[in-house]
Amino acid sequence: MSHIRSRFNKPPSEAMIGYTLSLPFDHRLYRYDIDGSIAHAKMLAKQNIIPLEDAEAICRGLEDVAAEIENRKFTFRTELEDIHMAIEARLFEIIGEVAGRLHTARSRNDQVALDLRLFVKDAVAETIAGISKLQLSLVDLAEGNKDVIMPGYTHLQPAQPVLFAHHLLAYFEMFQRDAERLNDVLKRADVMPLGSGSLTGVAYNIDREFVASELGFSQVSRNSMDAVSDRDFVIEYLAAASVCMMHLSRLAEEIILWASAEFGFIELDDAYTTGSSLMPQKKNPDAAELCRGKTGRIYGHMMAMLTTMKGLPLSYNRDLQEDKEGLFDAVDTLLSSLCVFYGMIGSLKVNKKNMERAAMRGYMLATDIADYLVARGETFRSAHGITAKLTRYATDKDKPLDQLSLDEYRKFSSLFDDDIFKVTAASSIAARNVTGGTSPQQVAKAIARAREIVGKTE
Amino acid sequence: MSHIRSRFNKPPSEAMIGYTLSLPFDHRLYRYDIDGSIAHAKMLAKQNIIPLEDAEAICRGLEDVAAEIENRKFTFRTELEDIHMAIEARLFEIIGEVAGRLHTARSRNDQVALDLRLFVKDAVAETIAGISKLQLSLVDLAEGNKDVIMPGYTHLQPAQPVLFAHHLLAYFEMFQRDAERLNDVLKRADVMPLGSGSLTGVAYNIDREFVASELGFSQVSRNSMDAVSDRDFVIEYLAAASVCMMHLSRLAEEIILWASAEFGFIELDDAYTTGSSLMPQKKNPDAAELCRGKTGRIYGHMMAMLTTMKGLPLSYNRDLQEDKEGLFDAVDTLLSSLCVFYGMIGSLKVNKKNMERAAMRGYMLATDIADYLVARGETFRSAHGITAKLTRYATDKDKPLDQLSLDEYRKFSSLFDDDIFKVTAASSIAARNVTGGTSPQQVAKAIARAREIVGKTE
Amino acid sequence: MSHIRSRFNKPPSEAMIGYTLSLPFDHRLYRYDIDGSIAHAKMLAKQNIIPLEDAEAICRGLEDVAAEIENRKFTFRTELEDIHMAIEARLFEIIGEVAGRLHTARSRNDQVALDLRLFVKDAVAETIAGISKLQLSLVDLAEGNKDVIMPGYTHLQPAQPVLFAHHLLAYFEMFQRDAERLNDVLKRADVMPLGSGSLTGVAYNIDREFVASELGFSQVSRNSMDAVSDRDFVIEYLAAASVCMMHLSRLAEEIILWASAEFGFIELDDAYTTGSSLMPQKKNPDAAELCRGKTGRIYGHMMAMLTTMKGLPLSYNRDLQEDKEGLFDAVDTLLSSLCVFYGMIGSLKVNKKNMERAAMRGYMLATDIADYLVARGETFRSAHGITAKLTRYATDKDKPLDQLSLDEYRKFSSLFDDDIFKVTAASSIAARNVTGGTSPQQVAKAIARAREIVGKTE
Amino acid sequence: MSHIRSRFNKPPSEAMIGYTLSLPFDHRLYRYDIDGSIAHAKMLAKQNIIPLEDAEAICRGLEDVAAEIENRKFTFRTELEDIHMAIEARLFEIIGEVAGRLHTARSRNDQVALDLRLFVKDAVAETIAGISKLQLSLVDLAEGNKDVIMPGYTHLQPAQPVLFAHHLLAYFEMFQRDAERLNDVLKRADVMPLGSGSLTGVAYNIDREFVASELGFSQVSRNSMDAVSDRDFVIEYLAAASVCMMHLSRLAEEIILWASAEFGFIELDDAYTTGSSLMPQKKNPDAAELCRGKTGRIYGHMMAMLTTMKGLPLSYNRDLQEDKEGLFDAVDTLLSSLCVFYGMIGSLKVNKKNMERAAMRGYMLATDIADYLVARGETFRSAHGITAKLTRYATDKDKPLDQLSLDEYRKFSSLFDDDIFKVTAASSIAARNVTGGTSPQQVAKAIARAREIVGKTE
């Protein structure tokens, strides 16, 4: 016997009720719905479409409903199906028949589009704020460890020494693009759809710009049929969230690697790990793992919305009700991921010694030795060939490069001199003194610029 | 001011608690968890790993917990993080320290794998049952309208006449494949993982086959590291659900088209539509639209799980916690979609007249006229050429083919005779008397076979 | 015996060669690679990093290579693996050892990032140009049929009459957002990565701004590790392309519906259909169907790139080689879809009569009748109730609303007067005279505005 | 000026030709098309639908066409659009008008369905064979290193010692499931669709079972409308390929980790890496990285096909032409990935010393110490508490557990005795002697079982 409740025990028409119901998730739009209705009522009065006193009664009634919801005194009756009906029904109870005037020159189709746009505008703002916090924690960590050298990897193989701060700032750049992308999403979310009616516009002398201005929109929609069936702004948010989550997944992967016994570069604060009482040194990087795992969830929500919209004829179709749950979950997931990473980055300890020991390993200075020869007149290609032979020789002898004698160096080129021993991880890093390079000077500039950018956001 | 609750108002370590919490969704695994623990405790006693009376106390205690949950007397304390801890903690309260023996030779990693496998096994069974119900409603509708002729479409253009029943049975075949696919999913879900420990197996003389048999599994897992990190069975369910939902989306699209004013082939029961009080004839096919829209959701959940699993090293990683929410929602969505379609198909009215009028239109019998000539000795290619000229002539004259005179027919081939007027939609359909064809005889066979298949499932 | 060539007949190391090879697809980046190398060589000379005459020899040599490729005299040797090696090897053959100086202060990692950014910048420009063409064809079709009335649909049920031009302009708005979105993609693609070296920046006194300016970039990248591992701009293009393709899929769906026998609203030009010689009236809307089908392909490419990037540690990893094939195919698919739709829209015939007949059907003026009563003082809610009863009455009598007598109207409200018969599809449309509404006046404005927008793009 | 060729330079109707063309990719179906036609022609003769000598001429002609294609003497003329037309046109050239009889009782719709099913059947067989090869290389590597101990990880943190062979065999299990899954795909691909005509079946006395038997199908399709519009088998292959590729991505991730300087567990053969001439020790694991990256591509192709099929009405729609390119690429990518991994696994060197050193680290024996106490009578929970205190004590003293004195052990429990020092990584592994556990005995059994399974496949 299955423990999953069978849908077929009741008449399917009852299953249908649950199938169409949106109140269990769209109730969180209540404040947007009420704000939108208040702006609409004010406009109707201003345009003499409804009497001023009716509009005032409606606005007061709506604020009463809002208060009830906020104080948890509101009963969400599922037979009312969605948050719009639930609020309207309660408004009738509170102010009586005059509530019937609110729906003048408006339809459910433009109303839900409005509410969702208000939500996305807030979501964008909150996400940018969260990104900014995380960026700040990265900058703080970078500045607090600005002299720490670590191996720079390509193919997860040590390639060249790099400042840990420089590595962290790579993520600053990624998140900065995310913030800019979200600002672009905003441009297309920031369009006021009310006045589009069911699909053709309304037959009243309304003032759409007034409503837009009341609600903080910078423009009104330009085609009523598009306005009631457009969910591009939802997909755009989800696409931007997907890229941001992808960036978090990359940082998560690195944190998991750095916190491993084999790397040993960082130690995470207990708050962001689960331990094993049996193995006190085992600190599982759960926050990073969960975030990496939740990347799939955001990608999935975007793919869901794109699939839902594929091939839909105009104008409004009930398929569009699927625009909310995935979006809400994506916003919640991304905001909490940003917050958790902010805390995790802000509290982790850097094992400077381990990082620097790793940065000394191998032949990571080979590029610098080739550059040394180029600086002394060798062509790049030939300098490259000489260095290759030299490192091959050192590998065969199983010696690090800095343990070779000058005589050994000179076997490969007479251009080598005493100062070859000044080629070190530190000198290698210092030499990358170009915009975007890892030299301490450039990294200091980058930190300053980063602080300025984050400062503007806050 | 945003209406979205900012995560950054509290210390991020508090956000972390909510981030890792699974109790809000994994509580629905409670019965599987308890069943698994009971089987485990029995085995421990049987193998003399724990005393029999302790095992009996544990089993009684677990049934008490189950009863508390079923009677809604159980307090889900979120500080206990997941359903396994919640149940274990309550067991300690009820039976005292002896509860501590339950966890012998078991770890959280094999325990959660077990619970999820039990859930998927149930989900597969319920889904197959739901599919079978829907298949039955399709067969009933087909049989109840077994003489109704409609246009068969390619490219959404009328191509050849076809029995409505034959069209419906195409969906029977799709859903039959879905059921078979789910049976295949079952094979790989039906593997008992307990005994894998955290990752290496356990150091006790356990009897895994006994546990498997107690819980109704047909085999035990073969590698402990695989067993704790395998979620293939989740992806497989989601893939099968995606294809089934895709089939539903195709049926949904057709129902929407058939219910449109332009097609007018069917009328949906009020329970599956929303009406407009202003426009009484407007019955919006909401159930079909929602189902079509929800297709994206299922696809998204599958993509999410595949993304989560990509590139994960062995063995257990916390990323795997993401295996539940999407799965649960997919199961719920698919089961309710099947149930709603079952009701919708079972209650719709067929507008026989409109279907048949549409089936008379155009030149849908051209193929049959070519076949007529082939039967009288013409080669296929030449018969095809003659018919093309004939239909072109009829089009130019703006006459349907059955309004041409025999003389006109004979202008194109002397093989035409009086019996050409016996070529009708009905004769066309009757002629497709091959396995899988639309002839009444074949369709009757197909209905009988379908009933037999569904009968076996029930 | 399988007809699929087995990979296992040869040593797997040979399979490996094909596995890593990118020349078969990255050859199309040749011009970007050469442009980038020329700018780099010029900069090296300007900065006295290499001699001027060497730089000049390099630039001339590169132009020779370009000419060979354009004139199909270039041999793509697959042992050279990628287009960068293929060009460099040929440069050595043409100008000798001096070619070895070109790679100074550059690595493969920043070079491939540069080439791909140049490609995406071009792709964005071409896509916007293609969108603009399609928009123009929509505006032309709208203007050429500006008086044509059709049913406006919600839930694919006729809801209110609407101008065909208004319906078309909804797509203009969608494509306008696509163009704006692509402009935003450009901002983040328009960043010059050269100078980032393998991952840490280069140890030469280079002038990155000069290179940026030579190649038409507006800024240089800010972090070398980010610059060599960032593919956000690829994902962003794919996301914008996915939304644009989704819009095309919606238009495709409508064209398929409109061209069906049941709707009969349009006739497609033969160039965009396949016919059946047997059924001359059957014109299959292949272009629209293929485009609808190809939507999946673009979505898939985006999901592929997001998956590839998930969880990658810094900096360059070979996984990134997967950034090209999907992108190239997406660009080609979108550009050809836009072009085909441009031609299809520009050549289709409108069946005005069928559209208008459909617009008369049913009770699509019910909303206007309610508005009529509101205008005469009835509250909205009560006007709505009266109209509902009226339409129910008409339905029961099986009469269209305009066939009711004034007496019959008056049974439901004494506010009805002779002028109720002036409520027509045309009056309904005219009344929607708000920004974004379907009134002829608004549509004329919208057409004018659309022409202005498209004019600016061209 | 863009380097991307503009589609808008030519009339869009020319772009349309390229848009619909499938010959550039479907040419690889040629052998399946010819095999299918030969079987069809034989059946037509057997049933006296066409003369025997005509069928013989057709079969000979088709083999001539096949020979021309195999010998690269066949001209693929793109104006013929697809491989079916290309072959048919050439057949007419070779054998004349009698070629016209081949199309009797067949349509393009059932013909393309047949060809694709034949391809998928081959693809399944090849994929299973490739999986089997890779499994064999895993078993060989496991057996060749059957005594090597390594850390077993959870959360990428060392958790318990494990045999390297056991870890490898976890992948054997994953790939075994992949093979079984593909066998299930085969069941639904192995259905013969010919005889379904365009959509309704054919009006000839054909023998479908004969055709099925000739072509090696085990059953015939049961509904003609379903048969011409079903692409489930394509999606099923893509879903199975996605899971298999996900498994490969996990193995790839581990290979990349193991080959890193920090882990140092394995050394890859040069054939599967790219080196740096400058840094001879740097061996980039390109094969593993590329495979991990290509995972996205397979996921994308599956998502594409699911998207394409969503919401398509019956029966054949041109959207279905999108069924091939993604499938072909998925088959090629998966087969070459399997082959490359087969070679890579077969040639890698194991650094036994590094693995074992890592396995000694930390407190990985804590679980065994708790088990030691349980075996001496302590309850599990209390044994767990004692061990936790003990390891905490050792951590504070910064001593490994095996460096504590017996006196120190006894501070925590008097149950400890001299034999506590017999608890080692080896004893820990030996103790996991349950089915699926890591004990040498179980691993030897697992290897034997694996060889038997692979033996059966070959």
Image (cartoon, coloured by chain):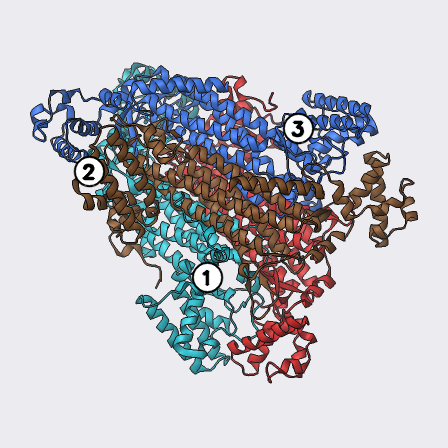
Chain colours: A red, B blue, C cyan, D brown
Q: Which label sits on residue C190?
A: 1
Tell me the element at label 2: helix
x then y, percent, for residue D154: 69, 46
Q: Quarter-wise, where is residue D166 in the image?
A: top right
> In the drawing, what numbered circle is on residue D374?
none
| Residue C243 seen in the current view | no
- Disc 2 to disc 3, C-alpha distance: 62 Å
**How far from the left and from the top, in percent, is residue A271?**
73, 47
> Looking at numbered disc 2 in the image, what kind of residue is underneath it?
Gly
Instruction: Give the residue drawn at x 62%, y 31%.
Output: B219
Q: Position of residue C67 (x, y in %)?
A: 33, 70
Mark 3, residues whose alpha carbon is within 10 Å: few (<14), some, or many (≥20)?
many
Chain ID at mark 3: B
> Viewed as shown, does residue D371 lie left or right of D35?
right
> Which residue position holds label 3?
B212
Q: Secondary structure at mark 1?
A: loop
Viewport quadrant of the N terminus of chain B: top right
Check the image and report above or below for D55 versus C177.
above
Residue under label 2, please give it.
Answer: D100
